[in-house]
């Protein structure tokens, strides 16, 4: 399975080239276009337990599967928001993915739901997904994606709204942005995540909360 990411970083889409019989699964509604020989199926991947796990993380209950029939085919996938797409190898290092960041992946990937304390304080989803296994994993973001590699023991602070994903097993601690409550309020930053290496932290350059705050209120 080959892929090509186009129009980065503002309006990225990904073209996935499938050999005969190859499949990729994606979030419901992600398909922009595809060749006529690609078969689309919408189903519950992994049974009811996996379905409820995806719902808890803010993903679709159903996922779409695209399979090339009678020869090679291609499908172009697009995120719902303007932003970036990144391909990640999770065969050796599983990745913890925040709500809404999964776009598509190999059908062999394994998904495990885990609780997110970030959700209780950061205004994000209450659960995250740990993804592992062989094959392609595609993440999407609002804004460009910026990966940050951390050395063993290296701390790094990320606003929770900018957090897309991080290497499983990394240290993860939530705290106020400043030492004082007044400073936290006046700085415009609420709760931040203190990540500790080794691992990679994937961040996005824009946040949904800031977009919503800029929208005019209807009367």
Image: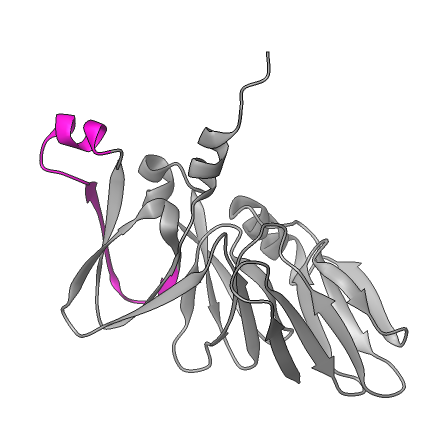
Residue nearer the viewer, 17 or 65: 17
| Any part of residue 150 in sight | yes
> Residue 180 location in percent, x, y?
10, 31
Residue span colored magenta: 165-187
Above or below, comparing residue 144 to residue 15 in the picture: above
Q: Is residue 209 left or right of residue 148?
A: right
Residue at image x 76%, y 58%?
43
Q: Is residue 59 left or right of residue 94?
A: right
Residue at image x 53%, y 82%?
134
Residue at image x 36%, y 68%?
147
Above or below, comparing residue 25 to residue 2 in the picture: above
Q: Is residue 208 left or right of residue 122?
A: right
> Residue 73 location in percent, x, y?
81, 81
> Residue 75 location in percent, x, y?
75, 72
The quadrant of the picture occupied by the N terminus is: bottom right
Q: Is residue 125 magenta?
A: no
| Any part of residue 116 in sight | no
Most distant residue in the left direction: 179
Q: Is residue 169 magenta?
A: yes
The picture quadrant where one finds residue 66 is bottom right
Check the image and tell me how it is coloured.
Answer: one colour
The picture quadrant where one finds residue 25 is bottom right
Q: Is residue 122 left or right of residue 64?
A: left
The quadrant of the picture occupied by the C terminus is: top right
């Amino acid at each position: 399975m080959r892929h090509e990411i186009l129009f980065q970083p503002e309006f990225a889409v990904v073209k996935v080239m499938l050999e005969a019989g190859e499949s990729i699964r994606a979030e419901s509604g992600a398909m922009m276009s595809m060749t006529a020989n690609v078969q689309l199926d919408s189903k519950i991947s992994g049974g009811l337990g996996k379905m409820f796990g995806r719902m808890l993380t803010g993903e679709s209950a159903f996922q779409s599967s695209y399979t090339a029939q009678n020869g090679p085919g291609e499908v172009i996938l697009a995120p719902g928001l303007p932003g970036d797409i990144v391909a990640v190898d999770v065969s050796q290092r599983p990745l913890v993915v925040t709500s809404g960041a999964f776009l598509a992946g190999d059908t062999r990937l394994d998904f495990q739901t885990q609780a997110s304390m970030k959700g209780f304080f950061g205004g994000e989803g209450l659960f995250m997904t740990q993804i592992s296994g062989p094959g392609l994993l595609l993440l999407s973001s609002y804004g460009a994606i910026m990966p940050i590699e951390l050395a063993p023991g290296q701390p790094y602070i990320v606003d929770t709204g900018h957090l897309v994903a991080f290497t499983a097993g990394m240290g993860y601690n939530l705290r106020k942005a400043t030492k004082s409550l007044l400073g936290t309020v006046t700085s415009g930053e609420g709760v931040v995540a203190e990540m500790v290496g080794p691992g990679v932290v994937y961040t996005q350059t824009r946040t949904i909360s800031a977009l919503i705050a800029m929208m005019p209120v209807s009367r």
